[in-house]
Image: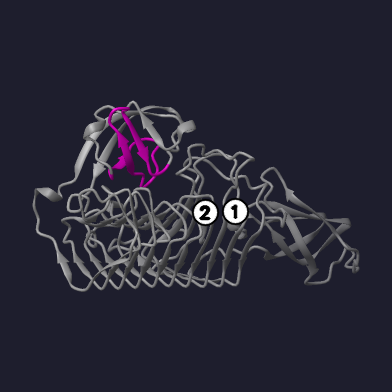
Amino acid sequence: MAAIMPGLTSFSNRRVIANGQISLIDGPAWNTRIVNSVGTYNPNNEYVLTGVANVANIEVGSRVVGAGVGREVYVQARNIGAGTLTLSQPLFGGAGTRSYAFHRYRYVFDFSGMERLDRFNIADIEFLLDGIGSCLMLAPTGSMIHMRDCYVTRPKDRGITSIGTGCQDILVDRCQFLSNEMTMNAQNRTTIAINVNNNDAKIRHNRFVRFGHFMVANGGGHIIEGNHWFQGDNAQAGVRFAGLVLTRTNIQTTVTGNYIDNASIEWTNEHSARPNFTNDEYSFGGLTITGNTFLVSNSTLGFCWLVMKPFGTGHFIHGLSVMGNVFKAMYGRAQRIDKVDTTYADMDYTRMRNLQFQGNMFNGINQYVADPVDLTLTQNTVANRWIINASNALPFRGNARKVESVVAEAAIVNAANARVTEMPWVQTQYGVARKSVAVNWTTPVRGQLSVRVRMDTAD
């Protein structure tokens, strides 16, 4: 676009491209350009690569690939004289000089040559991309881009790409994104429908079919509502991957009323230059997942819909609501709905607070999960201390940090079958793993209790 509008670096008046069809004709102009180079990264200058060899050959808008690089990191700007590249997101891999590959995809509308674009609307257009090219690359900065009632059919690599903060307040409404990788197994797909780096995206009432990921989102304040994304394949006992990837810890985001099919929600901090938790930052929090339909079919027992993946140590959850959702496994069962991916680090289960897992429905899933969770503790032989392991029934196999209530469901009796009416006392985080609750009596007794346990605290 910069080539057909020479000298126009910024445009903020509302413009609409509407109606009709855009169909691509194959040719060498659509070829992805890949440049390999070496650069130095310093977390103190988190958005910049320095000492970049061959910097003049690396195009603005290139995706950065290499060790220590999170998903959907792009070159936002370059300084040929200084040998530096400005990145769309920090790198999690720490300081060092490394080899990188820079992949430059080709787009129908490419605004990377401008500095800023605001209030650009695309409406009622069918993009027939046929695996030849991608759809829309946003300018490095801008706001209020809107795509509505469009069909993005078979993009070669990407649907909508943000290489900077030009995605602020982006709106995508009532569109259909159809992958070019429909016939591939899920593990072989590489295309992504949307990525955002900045805040306040509204993604509403769209349909995304068989992408590698439907969306990779940094930033916060997003509303993801009423969409249908599905990523299954024709394999039996097939593996499944994230549809929605959230890459900021404290995100103030709502995921409401979506149909999430053969895909998970993955929450990471891969776009952090210092992924280990420090006390001067927020850890994972601010996410509500409400009223969604979750489905999986023909998958492995280990599939989970909610995946926490910290890229550094010491992180915990301090604000997550998962309420009123339906989880269903078909043509095979799922073990549970949630897990922590410990590829890089585990979570600190001693600091979890303010989680709500309530009112969810489970079908074809072996392990019910709730917080708080009501557990039945049956003691058939007399003992002073009764032990119940609560970990499996708590979200993310959390610690048993709090007991809200203890209620006798049957008579508590001693060895002589005489009724005991005393109130027991409890020990939370009992045992080496801190996953159990101990109920203590002054005399050996047997019977049955209902114990309400939490993995978190309110403060």
Amino acid type at circle 2 is Lys
Give 373 or 82, whichever is nearer the viewer.
Answer: 82
The foreground one among 438 and 360 is 360
Residue count near mark 1 (Cα–Cα under 10 Å), binned few <14, some 14–19, many ≥20: some
- In this view of the protein, which residue sits in the foreground, 358 or 75? 75
Residue at x 66%, y 58% (from the top left corner): 354
Task: Name the image quarter holding residue 407.
Answer: bottom right
| Residue 77 falls within the magenta-colored stretch | yes
Q: Residue, x 75% and y 59% (percent of image)?
A: 403
Check disc 2 and report the residue beneath it.
Answer: 339
Residue 118: x %, y % from top left: 35, 59
Label number found at residue 33 = none
Q: Position of residue 359 (x, y in %)?
A: 60, 72
Horizontally, is 328 left or right of 9 in the view?
right
Whole-percent x, y for residue 327 in the image: 49, 69
- Left or right? Give the position of 6 relative to 432: left
As drawn, 112 above or below 86:
below
What residue is drawn where x is 64% and y is 62%?
371
Total labels: the figure holds 2
**Quick one: SS at disc 1?**
helix
The magenta stretch is: 61-89
Quadrant (top left/top right/bottom left/bottom right) for the C terminus: bottom right
Marks 1 and 2 in Cβ contact (< 8 Å):
yes
* Vertical arrangement, residue 124 with respect to residue 189, above or below: below
Residue 193 in magenta?
no
Q: Secondary structure at mark 2?
A: strand
At which x and y percent is residue 191?
A: 28, 54
Which mark, residue 397? 1
